[in-house]
Image (spheres, rainbow, N blue to C red):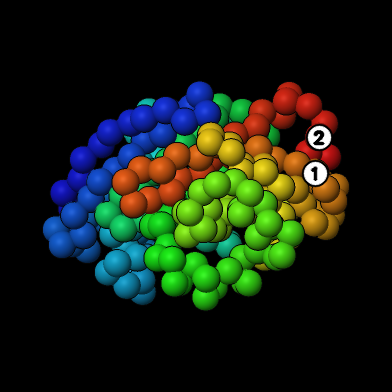
Amino acid sequence: MHTTHSTFSLANLTVHRITFDPATFTDADLLWLPHHAELSNAGRKRKAEHLAGRIAAAHALNARVIPGIGPSGEPLWPDGISGSITHSGTQAMAVVAREQQALIGIDCEAILPEYEAREIKDGIIDIQEEHVLSRSGYPFALALTLVFSAKESLFKALFPQVQAYMGFDNARVTLLDDKTLTLALTRQLAGFNESATFTLHWQQQDEQALTLLSRSPDDGPSRW
C-alpha cells in the first residue's frame, strides 16, 4: 500500500500522520503485522485503515514495535507507553507518551454537513451542551463534530483504566474556545469521579476536525 508519512504538533506532542491510498492495498501488505491473522475476516477497508494506523504507531514509537489488538479492539502498547490511534478517510494518525499511566486519546472526524449535524445532535449532546455550542460562535456543524471527536478521544484515553464501553452521555462539553474543549464526566467511572474535567486541544485541518487529550499522571488530582 502506498503511504506518506508526515508530522505536526498538537498539545506539545508530535502527531504522526500516514496518508494512504487504499486502492493500492493488497492482503500481502498485512504480513508486515505480527497479528495479521487476526484481521483475516476483516473487510478490505478495515484492513487498509488498520495497517495505516499501525504504520503511524510504529513511526510514533520510533522502534520496530507494532501495537497488537486487545480483547476490545484497543491497541496494545509496549510497557511504559501510552498511546492512541485514529483514522479518517485516507489518513491515519498516532501519538504516544512515554508514561505508562498517561491519558492519551486522539480522534479525527470529517466535519459533518449542517443537515446531518442537526439530525444526529440528540444522540451526541443534550440541551445544556447545545447552549455551550451556540455560545462558542462556531458553525454548529463544526462545533458538533468537535464534541463528537472530543468524546471519542476521551473514551479512548480512559478505556485502559475504565475497561468499559462509554456512551456520549457519559461526558458533557462545558467549554469550547479557539484552541481547547473541556469535557466533564456525568457519572462516576472506575477511577474517575463524576464531574471530573478534561481539557482537550483541537485543530481544524481542511474538512476534518481533530481532537487530542493528553494528561500526565502528575498533572494533578482533578481527574480522580
Q: Quadrant of the C terminus?
A: top right
As measured in the structure, the alpha-carbon distance from the residue carrying label 2 to the one carrying label 1 is 6 Å
Q: Return the mark for residue 196.
A: 1
- Badge 1: how crowded within 10 Å, few (<14), some, or many (20+)? some
**Side (left or right) of 11 relative to 34:** right
> According to the image, label 2 marks what residue?
222
45 relative to 119, above or below: above
Q: Quadrant of residue 38?
A: bottom left
| Percent position of residue 16, x then y | 36, 35
Residue at the spot 66% in from the left edge and 28% down from the top edge: 216
Dot 2 amino acid type: Ser
Residue at the spot 50% in from the left edge and 24% down from the top edge: 12
Dot 1 amino acid type: Ala
The answer to whether mark 2 and mark 1 are in CB contact below 8 A is: yes
Residue at the spot 43% in from the left edge and 66% down from the top edge: 114
- Which element type, helix, strand or loop, lies under badge 1? loop
| Percent position of residue 39, x then y | 37, 65
**Residue 173 seen in the current view:** yes
- Which element type, helix, strand or loop, lies under badge 2? helix
Q: Nearer the viewer, residue 18 or 116?
A: 116
Q: Quadrant of residue 219?
A: top right
Q: Earlier in the sequence, mark 2 or mark 1?
A: 1
106 relative to 38, above or below: above
